[in-house]
Image (cartoon, helix red, strand yellow):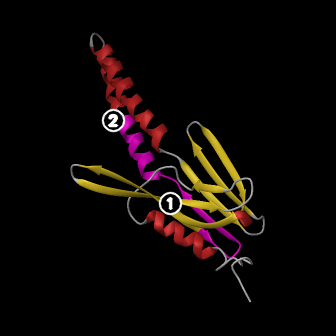
Amino acid sequence: MKVTRNTPNQLILSDTPWFIGIMLVFFILAFVGPGILLMTEGGEAILFGLIFALGGGGLGFGAFCAFVRRVQVILDRNKDSIVIRRQSVFGYEAVEHKLSNLSHAEIERTTSRSDKGTSTLYRPVLVLDKGMSAGRHPIVEAFSNGRGAHRLVEAVNDWLPAHKVDSVSQSA
């Protein structure tokens, strides 16, 4: 995911997994193409070609449906809104929150242990501290390693006002 627009009034974060999508299309074609060629030979090759095309192509299509999702997050000061859009093969979803309810962005961590040691994965979340949507809202559903989540959290927190005035904690 990357920052595609960063202006004083609007911050847009976007992820379109082109590489994974294109690689999965090649994977599907690598099974469907030879499967169809085998089916044109006739005889027993028809059944083998059909199984090869449907099995490999079906696995590739299943992976495409599971992993290729477009995500866009729009933070807009003028409209006082946060829109999280997700689009996949199965449909489109948009969730809207008030920007004035956004406290900050932070990192969620999960740790897994294996024989090779421990590994920590991250994902960015938006923290809404008031309103009907109060709580933690993941920007992306999957956890990942690397600095991507940290860069997104820094971008959101830098774009938000430097501090929100908390009248309770301020004293004269």
Residue 8 drawn in magenta:
yes
In the rendered image of this protein, does residue 81 appear above or below residue 60? Answer: below
Disc with the residue nearer the chain's start (1 vs 2): 1
Question: Which residue lies under the disc numbered 2?
Answer: 30
> Who is closer to the viewer here, 118 or 25?
118
In the rendered image of this protein, does residue 151 appear above or below residue 73? Answer: below
Q: Which quadrant of the view contains residue 48?
A: top left
Question: x%, y% of residue 73?
Answer: 62, 58
Question: x%, y% of residue 165?
Answer: 72, 79
- Amino acid residing under circle 2: Ala
> Who is closer to the viewer here, 67 or 28?
67
As drawn, which residue projects farthest toward the front? 172
The residue carrying pointer 2 sits among few (fewer than 14), some (14 to 19) or many (20 or more) residues within 10 Å by Cα, namely some
In the rendered image of this protein, does residue 166 appear above or below residue 99? Answer: below
Magenta segment: 5-29
Q: How many marks?
A: 2
Asked if the residue at tag 2 contacts the one at tag 1, i.e. Cβ–Cβ closer than 8 Å, the answer is no
**Labels 1, 2: front one:** 1
Q: Which quadrant of the view contains residue 11?
A: bottom right
Residue at the (34%, 18%) spot, across then down: 40
Question: x%, y% of residue 155?
Answer: 55, 71
Q: Quadrant of the C terminus?
A: bottom right
Give the alpha-carbon distance from disc 1 to disc 2, as whole Å.
28 Å
| SS category of the residue bearing label 1 | loop
Residue at the (45%, 64%) spot, across then down: 148
| SS category of the residue bearing label 2 | helix
> Who is closer to the viewer here, 66 or 133?
133
Q: Which quadrant of the view contains residue 49?
A: top left
User: Is 76 on the left or on the right of 110, as rendered?
Assistant: right
Q: Which mark is residue 86?
A: none
Question: x%, y% of residue 25?
Answer: 42, 40
Q: Which mark is residue 1?
A: 1
